[in-house]
Image: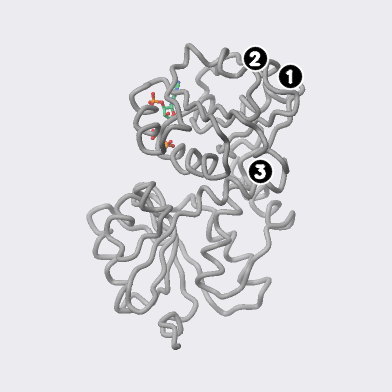
Amino acid sequence: MRDSRETFVNHAFVTGFPIKHSRSPLIHGHWLKSFGLPGSYRAHQVSPEKFADFLIALRDGSSGFCGGNVTIPHKERAFALCDRPDELSQELGASNTVWIENRLIHATNTDGYGFTANLDERAAGWDRCDTAVILGAGGASRAVVQAVRNRGVKTIHVVNRTVARAQELADRFGPAVQAQSMDDLSDLLKGAGLFINTTSLGMDGTPVPEIDFTVMDPDAVVTDIVYVPLKTPLLAQAEGQGLRTVDGLGMLLHQAAPGFERWFGKKPVVDDALRQIIIDDMDGHA
Ligand code: ATR
């Protein structure tokens, strides 16, 4: 069967507003180069007012793109506007990866895959824990909650300053997910096997709460989805207390892989060379 992707060969985008700080072009550019592919992957800034027109133009090929990534603030609208959102997107209500197939816009969300692939690579066996504590209930938390639940972790405490937002996630993702207040964080950590920070706490110089990670399971893993800086204040605390930690850069790298394979037909590798390209870029912009 002829695949409509043939018509729009090898041009993909990342769109957001703003988009100039996106590191996705570096990631896909590295993969295109390593495969020797002639295609392109470029940042394309689109304002919220123009997003619907941009997305719909993909359908008939007039934009010349076979698909792309969608980031903040367009993920919810990408989901709402696409023709064929997959199950992950439907439950999340947000999509970050789109592609054209038979003149229809298909969409998925690879953020959760990126999160779990990073932990699989750097802390294999992380999913054998019974209890996870996730700090934050914003947009970035959703895909993480979904992914951890889908890997079978039985109890997932979503701890948030605004408990009502955590409750929204509990309602969305079912009985494994429980909404909790910040006051209960210390108790909830006792015996837990996984701690994930999805907030921007500490990034803007605001004080970070002292957290006693030593009460967690001896094999526990502490991770952060923020990757600038690589060692976030919370990761530094956990490391200082002797916990296993995983930084968030791998999530960014791994979430890119399914889209690349979809648009360019090759399965890319997340390796140290790629990781170093992003670290060098971060150093250059420090
Ligand atoms: P994102 O899409 O990056 O997740 P967001 O939707 O604004 O951004 O969510 C930010 C998260 O960080 C929320 O969980 C937020 O808590 P609230 O829902 O109570 O706002 C959390 N957050 C941000 N600053 C915080 C702070 N100083 N203390 C505690 N939580 C904070």
Q: Quadrant of residue 49?
A: bottom left
Task: Tell me: residue 246, above or below residue 31.
Answer: above
Measured from the top left, where is residue 94 in percent x and y?
37, 50
Of the 4 image quadrants, the one containing the N terminus is bottom left
- Element at label 1: loop
- Secondary structure type for disc 3: helix
Q: Are marks 2 and 1 in contact (CB under 8 Å)?
A: yes
Q: Residues within 10 Å of mark 1 (few under 14, many from 20)?
A: few
Q: Alpha carbon of mark 2 to alpha carbon of mark 1: how far?
A: 8 Å
Q: Which residue is mark 1?
A: 241
Is the CB of mark 2 within 8 Å of ligand 1?
no
Q: Residue 17, percent across and down?
A: 36, 50
Quick check: marks 3 and 1 in contact, CB under 8 Å?
A: no
The amino acid at mark 3 is Leu
Q: Tell me what residue is drawn at x 68 percent, y 47 percent.
A: 120
Q: Nearer the viewer, residue 1 or 130?
A: 130
Q: Quadrant of ligand 1?
A: top left
Nearer the N terminus, badge 3 or badge 1? 3
Q: Which residue is mark 2?
A: 212
Give the numbered dot on residue 115: none
Point 61% across, 73% down: residue:
266
Mark 3 → mark 1, Cα distance in angstroms: 20 Å
N-term mark: 2 or 1: 2
Q: Is residue 80 visible?
A: yes
Residue that carries the numbered disc 3 in the rendered image: 119
Please state the horizontal and vertical placement of residue 171, each as a whole percent of the image.
35, 33
